[in-house]
Amino acid sequence: MNDLIFEIGKAIGKVFLNPLIYWIAFISIVISKRRIKDEQVQFQRELFPIGAEFEYTGGLTILGSLSVSIVAILFNMIFITEIILFLSIIIFILSFAFGFKMLSAAYTLGFTFLLFKVLEMFDNRLFELGYITNHTFSSIAVLIALFFFIEAIMYKLISNENAFPDIVKSKRGSWFGMYHIQKASIIPFFIFVPGKITIASLPVIPYFTIGGENISFALVPLFIGFHHIIKGQLPIQVTNRLRRNNTLLGSLVLITALISFYLPGIAVASVALAIIGKIYINHLIEVDDQKQGLSFIELKNELKIFAIVPNSPAHILGLKVGDTITKVNNIEVNSLDELNEQLNNLILFPNFEVLTTNQEVHTIGNEKYKGNLSELGIIFPTEQQLD
């Protein structure tokens, strides 16, 4: 047991020899820095710190890693190093070309599955020697289903307040606001690999031998993420649908994947369902969002709060994205000019009456903070933000 624990520790340490780990860190920093640069231009401040795309995912990494590892071991999932190699290459290509947008397991594991299905059609020693079997393909399908559930939990981590706001100019010259729903996480999981019998030998894949047998463990770092751009709705409205749809799709993929252990041909249908279903879900979100029009546009719903600066007075007071400010200290305000005038002329601390997204009137008391919109941390999609 001591030797087993020692070797597991060594395996975890060796995963840092995998170049994919450093690529993930690099591309994540690049994406964060690009976002921060846009925030500084548009809002004259950094709204979210570097690495905010990974915020709140620590617990998910631990829970996801344990859950997937247990299922992989219970199902006796055995991946040769070639599968891990090509999975890493696909993650690298998709993250390089699309950032977080194409990092669903439906794509990374799905494309890996399809690649080896194509190889199976040719004279390939991996299949002839039995290193890749129907059980292997069914195992990949099960993993895709599990990661659908993990992605659904990731959508739960998105709120109206932590989605990344962006202000751009329309073709007609008006400024409008949109949100980047963007989140990523790394879920490492243990899986069995054959020991020293595969065609490719990857020293960066950590493994150890169990009882002298030609079977080992590998710690596979799977990078998952998503990126949606929303213009016509609040982020929480979109993520709720994405969460439900991904959970439903994951359930269907899991059922078909389990059936494929007994009917091997079903594995292809299961993975095809995952890939096509994921594309369809994202397409529905885009189409529905376009039908909504522009929710935050200059001169339209001007006092509907587009964004709140994290940890600002407005955030501390409890103002929410999507709230519409109707009164300041019981004085009705109907335009941005009126709101600015009231804030600039106030002697007392401003209290706000807002209409919430549930169409409820709510009064927000305030005995600490006053100032203009920028000082309070309230953001509306206007050209003034770029002055």
Image (cartoon, rainbow, N blue to C red):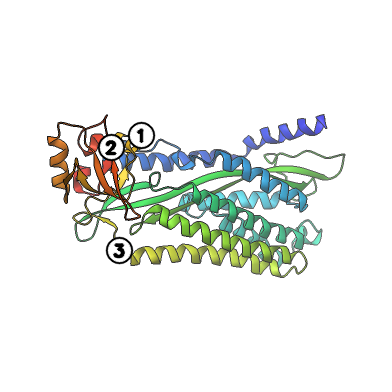
Residue under circle 3? 293
Q: Which amino acid does the dot numbered 3 rest on?
A: Gly
- Left or right side of 251 for 302: left
Judged from the image, the secondary structure of the residue bearing numbered disc 3 is loop
- Left or right side of 201 for 152: left
Mark 2 against mark 3, which lies toward the viewer?
2
Mark 2 against mark 1, which lies toward the viewer?
2
- Left or right side of 100 for 174: left
Position of residue 346 relative to residue 169, above or below, is: above
Position of residue 138 relative to residue 325, above or below, is: below
Do callouts 2 and 1 mark residues in contact (Cβ within 8 Å)? no
Q: Which amino acid does the dot numbered 1 rest on?
A: Asn
Alpha-carbon span between mark 3 and mark 1: 30 Å
> Which numbered disc flags the more N-terminal residue, 3 or 1?
3
Residue under circle 1? 311
Neighbour tally class for label 2: few under 14, some 14-19, many 20 plus, Cα within 10 Å: some
Residue 35 % position (x, y)? 37, 43
Residue 281 % position (x, y)? 49, 64
Q: Residue furthest right?
A: 212
Judged from the image, the secondary structure of the residue bearing numbered disc 2 is loop
Do callouts 3 and 1 mark residues in contact (Cβ within 8 Å)? no
Alpha-carbon span between mark 2 and mark 3: 33 Å
Residue 178 % position (x, y)? 32, 53
Decide which of 102, 377 is in the foreground and name it.
Answer: 377
- Residue 82 in sight from this viewpoint: yes
- Residue 200 in sight from this viewpoint: no
User: Which dot marks residue 365?
Assistant: 2
> Which numbered disc flags the more N-terminal residue, 2 or 3?
3
Decide which of 132, 181 is in the foreground and name it.
Answer: 181
The structure residue drawn at horizontal position 30% and vertical position 34%, both measured from the top left corner, is 313
Quarter of the picture holding the C terminus = top left
